[in-house]
Image: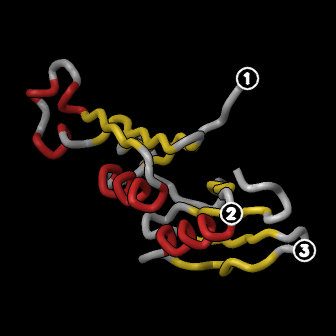
Amino acid sequence: MIQISAYLTFDGNCREAMSFYRECLGGDLSFRTVAEAEGAAVLPEPFREAVVQATLVSGELVLTGSDMVGEEGLIKGNAVSLLLHCRGEKETRDCYRKLSAGGVACHPLQDTISGGLFGVLTDKYGHHWLLTCNHIYPKK
């Protein structure tokens, strides 16, 4: 089966941001840096610390990030959002509180007509999140 995972690009703060997401969402986090690449010793020190790939795995959640950005530079916008399906009300409220810390709570969590919760936030790294859970489905 084809699976889509979120891949986030950062402007030099990938390690900080992905560590923040691990605090919010739990899971195992790994990093690969430029320093690990062959020939990296000749590069300036700040560039060697750049994250080529960070991967956070928490249950079925896979979140990947990188400091590597093309020549156009990092362009942030609202064309892509991260939709986080939570297992219940407590988890939804907890994730919303943690992810919105230092960011903007665009749409506070509210009950939906289908019996769930829905809220929108932009985290302190400028990434847009939609959080949802549905109370009418059995909790896993």
Q: What is the x, y in percent for residue 19?
A: 34, 54
Check the image and report above or below for 102 versus 19: below
At a point 59% along the width and 40% down the height, the residue shown is 60
Q: Which residue is mark 2?
A: 88
Question: Quick one: label 3, few (<14), some, or many (20+) residues within 10 Å?
Answer: few
Question: Quick one: label 2, few (<14), some, or many (20+) residues within 10 Å?
Answer: some
- 113 relative position to 104: left or right: right
Q: What is the x, y in percent for residue 68?
A: 37, 40
- 109 relative position to 29: left or right: right
Indicate the amino acid at tag 2: Gly
Q: Secondary structure at mark 3?
A: loop
Determine the CA span between mark 3 and mark 2: 16 Å
Q: Which residue is mark 3?
A: 113
Determine the CA span between mark 1 and mark 2: 26 Å
Q: Which mark is residue 90?
A: none
Counting residues from the N terminus, which is met first, the one under dot 3 or under dot 1? 1
At a point 9% along the width and 27% down the height, the residue shown is 41
Q: What is the x, y in percent for residue 130?
A: 67, 63
Q: Which residue is mark 1?
A: 1
Indicate the amino acid at tag 3: Ile
**Can the viewer see residue 71 in this picture?**
no
Indicate the amino acid at tag 1: Met
Closer to us: 89 or 113: 89
Q: Secondary structure at mark 2?
A: loop
Which numbered mark, 1 or 2, is in the foreground of this view?
A: 2
Q: What is the x, y in percent for residue 81?
A: 64, 56
At a point 37% along the width and 57% down the height, the residue shown is 17
Determine the CA span between mark 3 and mark 1: 32 Å
Query: Residue lying farthest right?
Result: 113
